[in-house]
């Protein structure tokens, strides 16, 4: 009888764990912090280039297709959104405070983006629970832009990259 009760308890716990709700992305602030403007043309520092190449080795599911990188970024900030051009080839558009579904071909994911303090943060969550977290911010003097992105899958960080860009004049 005791063995039966232990087995029943274990089966119940596994059933409850299997029914756990999927992560839901929380909306971020649409209010631009006073004095923050990410606009500009930015050049990736040479010492940041190798970390990107090493960091892109991830076995994460579909969320990888939503990660864009480049050596030269052009950011255009408006009152309502941010446009990021990667090496003059790909342009991503983010609306402050957005929460929507995005897709690349047949691959869909949930996305939120907005302000967390003085950093602009974009989170993209695929159907398998892998999450891409991408953020942009300026150093206090505005001469450098710091970009960080990571991919978290199954509770473990698979990619964690920090980049430094210099303002290109």
Image (spheres, rainbow, N blue to C red):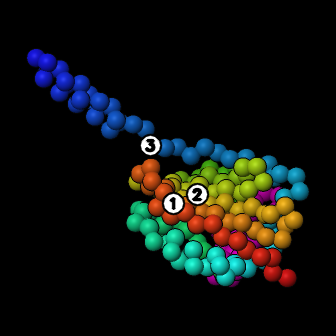
* Residue drawn at point x = 62 percent, y = 61 percent: 134
Q: Above or below — where is 93 with respect to 96? A: below
**Residues in magenta?**
72-92
Q: Nearer the viewer, mark 1 or mark 3?
A: 1
Q: Is residue 141 left or right of residue 113?
A: right
Q: Which mark is residue 22?
A: 3
Q: Above or below — where is 132 with respect to 155? A: below
Q: Is residue 127 left or right of residue 123?
A: left
Contact flag, marks 1 and 2 (Cβ < 8 Å): yes
How many numbered marks appear? Answer: 3
Task: Pinpoint residue 133: horizontal percent, then vertical percent.
Answer: 58, 57
Contact flag, marks 3 and 2 (Cβ < 8 Å): no
Task: Pinpoint residue 35: horizontal percent, then vertical percent.
Answer: 89, 57
Task: Pinpoint residue 63: horizontal percent, then vertical percent.
Answer: 48, 62
Task: Pinpoint residue 5: horizontal percent, then vertical percent.
Answer: 17, 20
SS label for mark 2: strand
Q: Is residue 102 visible?
A: no
Q: Which mark is residue 151?
A: 1
Q: Which quarter of the figure is the C terminus placed in?
A: bottom right
Prevailing secondary structure class for the magenta stretch in the rendered image: strand
**Is residue 94 within the magenta segment?**
no
Q: Earlier in the sequence, mark 1 or mark 3?
A: 3
* Residue drawn at point x = 79 percent, y = 48 percent: 31
* Residue drawn at point x = 41 percent, y = 51 percent: 154
């Amino acid at each position: 009888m005791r063995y039966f009760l232990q087995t029943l308890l274990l089966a119940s716990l596994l059933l409850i764990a299997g029914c756990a709700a999927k992560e839901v992305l929380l909306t971020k602030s649409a209010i631009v912090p006073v004095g923050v403007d990410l606009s500009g043309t930015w050049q990736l520092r040479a010492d940041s280039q190798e970390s990107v190449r090493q960091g892109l080795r991830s076995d994460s599911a579909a969320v990888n297709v939503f990660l864009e990188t480049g050596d030269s970024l052009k950011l255009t900030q408006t009152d309502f959104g941010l446009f990021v051009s990667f090496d003059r080839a790909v342009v991503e558009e983010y609306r402050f405070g957005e929460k929507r579904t995005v897709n690349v071909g047949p691959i869909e994911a949930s996305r939120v983006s907005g302000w967390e303090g003085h950093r602009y943060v974009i989170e993209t969550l695929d159907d398998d629970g892998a999450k891409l977290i991408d953020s942009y911010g300026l150093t206090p003097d505005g001469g450098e832009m710091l970009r960080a992105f990571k991919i978290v899958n199954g509770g473990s960080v698979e990619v964690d990259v920090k980049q430094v860009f210099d303002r290109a004049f």
